[in-house]
């Protein structure tokens, strides 16, 4: 009888400790994102917070959320997350200069996953979209709409570094292969609708005939389309974009009869993949150091699949 009671008591103790064991299994993740300066960045924050809440409710993570306005602030937050006891960091950097802090975290045993931009640290993981393939897809879309002759205005954004360089590389190299007779006019702009509006107004004034616009960003495209409407221009048959902006998706649908608009999907939803990578690595799974998510074209033909009325952020 004593033996049976001892076994029963042991079972009760084990069952009593089960919730504690499950709680201890939750991964502690520090999520570091930049303060919102662009709709796409706002989308990162929105999707990251939503997914963290979902994962926390499922008992998979504990998390702390940090926002910063510059590299120095984000670097300090890496240290704060380490002091909190983070096992993993998911970082969406917008600046250089955090490699020392990231390396210190990795050397201390933390899993560090960077979103989109490189942090030169040994042992870091990275999740990114395929910038070059966005340019390739944009070139093919434009040629499909205008053929192999005409004038295309390209809107690179030099301050964005490799993002602009890779998107332009994919575009110009593909155009050279499939439509070498198309004239490409480059005009530097920025990833904002205000710059898209202002710069496109200047471009329209300077060019009496334009067949298509290769824009690298959805918000730039929103501004450019406003300038085209304001000028009453009907010669432009196609415009691209990039990102995953719900407002732009709506425009793609609404203007389908006027202009062939598309977006090369580079969604802030990819921040969720960073969380999954972090959890998997902490859990002992083998994960590729770099995960590249292919780009997809969103156009009038498939835009309904991507419209999300619940997403009022980006």
Image (cartoon, rainbow, N blue to C red):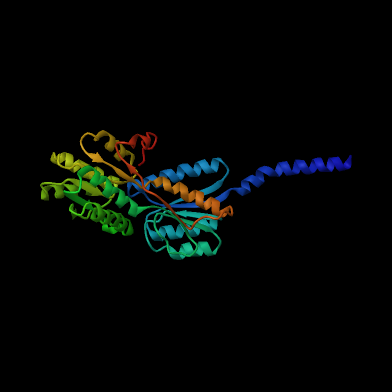
Does residue 116 appear left or right of residue 281 in this picture? left
* Nearer-the-camera pick, 263 or 294: 294
Q: Looking at the figure, which quarter contains the N terminus?
A: top right
Question: Please, which residue is most extreme toward the right here?
Answer: 1
* Nearer-the-camera pick, 153 or 14: 153
Query: Residue, x 32% and y 56% (percent of image)?
Result: 163
- How many numbered discs sit on the rendered protein? 0
Q: Looking at the figure, which quarter contains the C terminus?
A: top left
Task: Using the rendered image of the protein, determine whether residue 193 is visible from the camera's viewpoint.
Answer: no
Does residue 202 appear left or right of residue 26 in this picture? left
Residue 124 pos. (x, y %): 48, 60
Whether residue 224 is situated above or below residue 310 in the rendered picture: below
Query: Residue, x 35% and y 34% (percent of image)?
Result: 304
Whether residue 200 is situated above or below residue 80 in the rendered picture: above
Residue 146 pos. (x, y %): 20, 44
Residue 52 pos. (x, y %): 49, 44
Query: Residue, x 57% and y 50% (percent of image)?
Result: 27
Task: Using the rendered image of the protein, determine whether residue 34 is visible from the camera's viewpoint.
Answer: yes
Does residue 150 appear left or right of residue 160 in this picture? left
């Amino acid at each position: 009888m004593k033996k049976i009671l001892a076994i029963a008591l042991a079972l009760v103790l084990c069952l009593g400790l089960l919730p504690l064991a499950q709680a201890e299994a939750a991964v502690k993740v520090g999520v570091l994102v930049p303060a919102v300066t662009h709709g796409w960045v706002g989308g990162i924050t929105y999707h990251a917070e939503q997914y963290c809440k979902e994962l926390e409710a499922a008992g998979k993570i504990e998390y702390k959320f940090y926002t910063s306005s510059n590299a120095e602030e984000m670097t300090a937050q890496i240290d704060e997350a380490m002091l909190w006891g983070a096992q993993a960091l998911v970082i969406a950097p917008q600046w250089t200069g955090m490699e020392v802090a990231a390396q210190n975290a990795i050397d201390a045993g933390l899993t560090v996953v960077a979103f989109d931009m490189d942090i030169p640290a040994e042992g870091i993981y990275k999740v990114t979209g395929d910038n070059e393939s966005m340019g390739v897809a944009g070139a093919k879309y434009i040629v499909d709409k205008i053929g192999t002759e005409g004038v295309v205005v390209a809107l690179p954004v030099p301050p964005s570094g490799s993002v602009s360089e890779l998107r332009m590389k994919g575009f110009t190299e593909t155009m050279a292969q499939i439509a070498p007779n198309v004239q490409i006019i480059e005009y530097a702009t920025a990833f904002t609708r205000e710059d898209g509006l202002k710069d496109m107004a200047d471009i329209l004034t300077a060019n009496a005939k334009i067949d298509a616009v290769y824009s690298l960003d959805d918000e730039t495209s929103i501004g450019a389309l406003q300038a085209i409407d304001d000028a009453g221009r009907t010669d432009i048959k196609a415009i691209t974009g990039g990102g995953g902006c719900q407002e732009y998706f709506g425009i793609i649908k609404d203007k389908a009869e006027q202009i062939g608009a598309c977006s090369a999907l580079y969604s802030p939803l990819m921040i969720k993949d960073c969380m999954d990578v972090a959890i998997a690595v902490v859990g002992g799974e083998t994960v590729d150091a770099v995960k590249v998510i292919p780009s997809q074209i969103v156009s009038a033909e498939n835009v309904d699949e991507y419209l999300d009325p619940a997403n009022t952020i980006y």
